[in-house]
Amino acid sequence: MMTGDQYRSSLKDGRRIYFRGQRVDDVTTHPTFAQQVDAAAVGYDKIYDPDPNGLSQLMEAPRSIEALRRQTEDEPDLLSGISCTSAMTLLTAADRLDARRPQGADNIRAYVKDIQRRDLRIVECITDAKGDRTLAPAKQADPDAYLRVIERRTDGVVIRGCKLHIAQAPIAHELMVIPTKSMKPDEGDYSIACGVAVDTPGVKIVNAGTLPSDVDRRDYPFADAHFCSHGFVIFDDVFVPNERIFLDGEADLSAAFAHSLGTWTRVRGLARMIDEADIMAGFASLIADANGLEKVAHIREKITDMAIHATVLRALLEAALSNARTLPSGMVAPDELYISTGKWIGASERALMTRHLQDIAGGSLLTAPSRADLDNPETGDLVRKYMVGAAAYDGEYRLKLFHALKDLTVSATGVYRSIASLTAGGGLFAQRVVLRNRYDIGRARRMALESVGMEREG
Amino acid sequence: MMTGDQYRSSLKDGRRIYFRGQRVDDVTTHPTFAQQVDAAAVGYDKIYDPDPNGLSQLMEAPRSIEALRRQTEDEPDLLSGISCTSAMTLLTAADRLDARRPQGADNIRAYVKDIQRRDLRIVECITDAKGDRTLAPAKQADPDAYLRVIERRTDGVVIRGCKLHIAQAPIAHELMVIPTKSMKPDEGDYSIACGVAVDTPGVKIVNAGTLPSDVDRRDYPFADAHFCSHGFVIFDDVFVPNERIFLDGEADLSAAFAHSLGTWTRVRGLARMIDEADIMAGFASLIADANGLEKVAHIREKITDMAIHATVLRALLEAALSNARTLPSGMVAPDELYISTGKWIGASERALMTRHLQDIAGGSLLTAPSRADLDNPETGDLVRKYMVGAAAYDGEYRLKLFHALKDLTVSATGVYRSIASLTAGGGLFAQRVVLRNRYDIGRARRMALESVGMEREG
Amino acid sequence: MMTGDQYRSSLKDGRRIYFRGQRVDDVTTHPTFAQQVDAAAVGYDKIYDPDPNGLSQLMEAPRSIEALRRQTEDEPDLLSGISCTSAMTLLTAADRLDARRPQGADNIRAYVKDIQRRDLRIVECITDAKGDRTLAPAKQADPDAYLRVIERRTDGVVIRGCKLHIAQAPIAHELMVIPTKSMKPDEGDYSIACGVAVDTPGVKIVNAGTLPSDVDRRDYPFADAHFCSHGFVIFDDVFVPNERIFLDGEADLSAAFAHSLGTWTRVRGLARMIDEADIMAGFASLIADANGLEKVAHIREKITDMAIHATVLRALLEAALSNARTLPSGMVAPDELYISTGKWIGASERALMTRHLQDIAGGSLLTAPSRADLDNPETGDLVRKYMVGAAAYDGEYRLKLFHALKDLTVSATGVYRSIASLTAGGGLFAQRVVLRNRYDIGRARRMALESVGMEREG
Amino acid sequence: MMTGDQYRSSLKDGRRIYFRGQRVDDVTTHPTFAQQVDAAAVGYDKIYDPDPNGLSQLMEAPRSIEALRRQTEDEPDLLSGISCTSAMTLLTAADRLDARRPQGADNIRAYVKDIQRRDLRIVECITDAKGDRTLAPAKQADPDAYLRVIERRTDGVVIRGCKLHIAQAPIAHELMVIPTKSMKPDEGDYSIACGVAVDTPGVKIVNAGTLPSDVDRRDYPFADAHFCSHGFVIFDDVFVPNERIFLDGEADLSAAFAHSLGTWTRVRGLARMIDEADIMAGFASLIADANGLEKVAHIREKITDMAIHATVLRALLEAALSNARTLPSGMVAPDELYISTGKWIGASERALMTRHLQDIAGGSLLTAPSRADLDNPETGDLVRKYMVGAAAYDGEYRLKLFHALKDLTVSATGVYRSIASLTAGGGLFAQRVVLRNRYDIGRARRMALESVGMEREG
């Protein structure tokens, strides 16, 4: 296993990372990426085992509900979480490949084992560029709108395309490339799943999302710990050797990967949403107190709405865990009906919860002076004096709360998380499609007829 | 234990029941009450055990999560459910009386055992008339606005007052009388909890709620199975002997009963709401099919909303069960945070779910001819002809669905259930107060501060 | 013009009306219909003009915004309102027929003039049985699923089919029969619009919706004034003479009638919804006071929500009137964007407003004893005593309020109105389609581009 | 009147402006403020009249509904709008001062006339620091928590305190200082309203809110045109001469200013919200098209929701204008019920509309590469290639739309506007209080009773 420092060194591998029109020489020192690298390095150190034969438990398939709960709730760092989700996706898909493409299943298990052994981090690459959304992959004006195999060789294949919205790609080692959806029989070239190292020739990652780099970091306490970049990952004719190919051509199996990823990314997303919901309720309560308004009825009701939201999300996770199912391989996976319902509610209600929080905090969330204004002798004491709210707290504490709330709900980082909650694991509508398919409408119809003494439909 | 017929006989005890200005001589034959009696009798027969020493399991305290789940989900009939809730309320309260009023706790346990042995049914009487809601019981213009002890004798007490909204009181044997809320030190006379037989002199029950008695029952298939009357139960100076007194004067313990009832009535209410939510989703799907509209996007989305609603409620019950706690006596009780959140959501969203169902069904829910119009040779075939929707179903089937939906969402019975879901176990706001108190806001505040690296409040 | 008594006499014309499997001999005396006849008769007397050459102003096309406002807001009675809507529909459609079928336009104007002269009442018959909703009229298994011409003679046509959800058909004189939607070129036989007298041979009206006839009417104060039956109107081969034919075969004009009806039925529906919204806010305030709870924060907020709802609806009507447009004939018609938006909001929010009202009132809305229980000496004084809430009001007043609320929100009449608000003038989705088509999305797109300095799309 | 250049020069007056801990020497050249100065200068040039006796019409009181509509809808620039709102506030308050403090009314009218003559810009300073919100101004631990008179001299007064959330204060000439709420009799020192020039000794303005200054401005097309800073305006013992004092000590009149400001700031805010709502609907339609998804049902419905939102807001403004009232002075003011209802809905629904827009756009709103990545030859063509959506548009156009949407909904500027919509003119709850007070609940109660034939309350 690697230490944080070994991880840092491992990123200096010639990868082609771009940001705001420039190539990034070294992600470990670049202002936009260094902080993310640091957070991931802390995660490495947190679970480091010096045993030379040590195998990272991070990507071990859970074999009990309790193991599943631990894996879902305890996340050493953001990149570790994504890596775990990716590994679980592959292992779940392997179960479904066994009959039809056993070599692919074997490749997956060997690949995951190798990653565990080398203690690497892997991110998922699923969403294609997609071109015209109304056309199938094979019908696009540009055949590369969905990633595809453009050449087959005896020792492997060459792929071309682009994968969007890839969180933390520039600081990972491996890319899990999988089809974005179910492919049709004539879309065999698009039915490709494989593992690609980030530093493979032809891989270029253009990044979006940044902390403002010219600001006082004290004013952005949330971003400091939670910032995440997103990559536009281009596969500009990349060679993939046979042993890293999991699927190639079996269109009927192409949806297995997206389906598996959906389950694992949503359960993790739901666990994070619950934390966020509690954190937002907590901040609402803290700032209401600091403003001296905690007893005002409409504020108390808004905090209650936030508590309800957090409780509903937690119940859905609880139900997904207590109703988990065991796969043929013995792996335990969460119930998809509850998970997708949770993801839907979490994403759809977040905007309202944010509004509550901002409404409770009031305008100073927007207009509070900066920490540097406290340092300036011409303004510092005056700002402190006038930022005092409830007598129990000083002006600086209240100022810090406003900065935290601004960063959580207004700054790019905070809002990025809000949008990510909408779009990760599929947009709002995708959650509805999944949960609709999982809900047992046949049973509901039978119950309905029975309630009025009708024996059968028709 | 009693059979259904023995139960019927047991109701002919001279009880004073009123309906629409008339005294009801015999509830087992009166058009408004007979059907409820029948439903309760079916429940008796369903669980009848001929063993002469048989003890009804209906009111046995659950000692495991599984027993709690069974008790919550399996209900022989409506009156049995209410009886079970009442018994659980008393037994839970007994645990809290042990230290302060051991005699009351003993009386409770003996009373419940006796009811089990005699296989009686008991309903809860909690809500007082209340008079001016802004005034405490002891401050009312009419001191009887809250039920109270008006005389203390050596062998018992005399009580006066009125309890409102008492479901199925006219067909039960016993009334569990408990304080409606926490009483203050000077409200000892209002701190009375006791058991009163329905046929005790001074008890008068004025009822509301009825099936239209002049209609073709085939047009009301839902009401037929689910109708429930509500009593306005007057205690016009009723004597209660000492062994039936559970609490008398200990104002500080007065809230224990209401609190216990809240938990048990809400968990049962939540289980019923889940059934109803599934039934409503089922009907939505059935009528959409019968109309030939099941593929229309906005209809599919409305059914999905209904599936989400049912799933959220079920998750909250699942979480309440899997997080159940064990009381000192070994009794297992559901988690109150999840239960009250579930009750709140179930009650607050029901109006929208009903709207979805009515909107999907369309105007014929309102305007469909009656079953008798099918029988009339002048109109029958024409009605059948024009009630055909999707070709797979005949006009009569579709007509029956419309009748079911009208009865479920429009007729007095259906709407009564809808309002009962709002008001039973406390109104919407009461649920919020409970859940707010159960939500761990302190933990949320700590999580909030930690997320931005602040060490403590202030 | 006719007096109320003359109107009553005019209904004894041998019409074939059915109810609960029986033919109704005389609607003016039948318990289900007499009350509606009475209400309509009051409307006749209200606007009666003894001048023998008098012409009813009821159906005069408005020529100014002020006339439009008066027509919309002042309604002598329910049947008059429907008659006015029908006449406006025909006159608006006439403007669109002038070029393509001038004879139809002339027939319409002569027909309306004749109705005015004879002072008749006319109801709209639009919605067909529709059969399988996924199939066009000409593709149905039963060709009569949409009303059609089955025979053409030199002096007229014979029509067959069924029109659903026809409010007050059994107490009107004339049926305005129009196509339910736009017809395709091969659906000429379905492109029929005409006027049919209620007593024409072949017309049979099967009715739904009733007051419970066996109850004390004092307990149903709202239904007493507002009850409305709905007819299933069968055209079992009905002859229509040429001068009563407005459209026959011009499929491209078939939508003109439905479109016109939509505008006029929605504007009237919106005006009624505003009244209802104010009435519901008023009741909420009255019962909160009677319960002594008018100062409780969550109740005040619910009443505020009801005030907002009423205000939004009123603003939409105000905007529809102040932005009314003048048609070629000089007739002034309301703006359709605002009207359909108002109708959508009114219908979609009504369920929530009803929930607020019920939640504020509490369980006694459901369980209050009846007026007859007040008359019974065994219970009357006790019911009065325990129904007292805030000291300023007696128990009987509060009981009456509960009865009014039950009737408004629980009884068949109240709930019928609620569903009618969903379905009249098209369901919720239909409103969205109309308003979407009326919203100027092109202007919005230009504003969007301009806001970021982009010059054009693409 | 001044030109834009004269305005720029006028700002070099030694004002004490602070930003991020530094004093700003010249707002016209500082990166955070220059752009706002430029926008205001464009506004000056737009309405410049070279007539040396010219009087700015910007702050002329409207005397007709049409004039009120023009003033509300046409805004040369943001600072002009705020200035107009401030002037209207003063003139409306003057009407209420005439009887009780005629000198104050005269001072106001002379002050506004002078500002018009000198063509200055004035911003409103209302919100105080407030300290502990549960305590009245005179009861605070720090008596300066609300701005107050600390010294009275023969020629004027000295004031001390702080006003929060002051939009564009650093680029205006004058500060309109008014009490934040109704004061009590013993709060005469807090009952102070006056005009203060920005460059008056003792005035210090600490600013928050900034464009990221180190980014490519092409990626922020919205902020570029719409950015607005917010000042924390400290009055550190500022002398105000008598002729600039409008109110001093008349506690009973203190609310007149806040009330007037509420009306004028809300009507302008509502007009801006309508524009924003249309712009958001327009962007939703544009990006749906560019993604090729404009026909997908759930996307069409979300755009319809946005159209409904814009239409409701517009109807409320229309109703507020058509129901405007004329004040004693002949000034025409909008109806407050409709305005505050509009403000409430606009603010409360904005979060949902933003969610719709983000959900329709999808993840690229978050992760689209920057404009500079297009310029980089290593990535430019690849980004262009993979950003293509619907075939009708090129990748660069779609990229620009994503940048616009990110800037509108994610960047600091966009989100600042969202929060400003919540907090400006009072938070959500404040709108409810205003509209509740304006709604005629007495009329609603009378309508309710009448609907069930009850003659009177009680």
Image (cartoon, coloured by chain):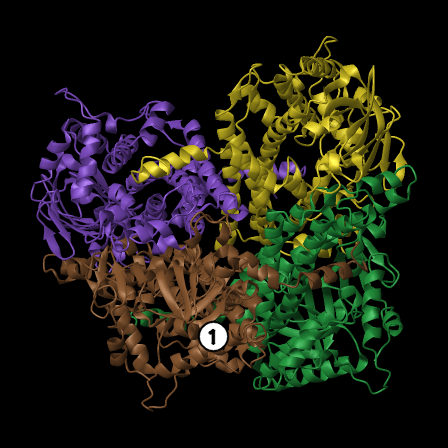
Chain colours: A brown, B green, C yellow, D purple
Q: Nearer the viewer, residue A140 or D126?
A: A140
Query: Which percent across, then down, holds residue B157?
Result: 69, 75
Q: Secondary structure at mark 1?
A: helix
Horizontal arrangement in the rendering, residue B387 relative to residue C320 (left or right):
right
Relative to residue A269, is residue D381 depicted above or below? above
Q: Nearer the viewer, residue A258 or D201?
A: A258
Q: Quadrant of the N terminus of chain A?
A: bottom left
x 69%, y 84%: residue: B109
Query: Which percent across, then down, holds residue D324?
Result: 40, 28
Q: Nearer the viewer, residue B245 or A234?
A: A234
Relative to residue D86, is residue A90 depicted above or below? below
Which image quadrant for residue A168? bottom left
Judge the density around disc 1: few (<14), some (14-19), many (≥20) Cα neighbours within 10 Å: many
Chain ID for label 1?
A: A
x 84%, y 81%: residue: B49
Residue C278 showing in the rendered view: no
Which image quadrant for residue D119? top left
List the single residue furthest toward the front: A154
x 33%, y 49%: residue: D384
Question: Label 1 sits on what residue type?
Answer: Met
Query: Which percent across, then down, holds residue D98?
Result: 27, 30
List the single residue furthest toward the top: C53
Residue B222 showing in the rendered view: yes
Q: Which residue is mark 1?
A: A88
Horizontal arrangement in the rendering, residue C288 relative to residue D185 (left or right):
right
Query: Which percent across, then down, holds residue B40?
Result: 81, 68
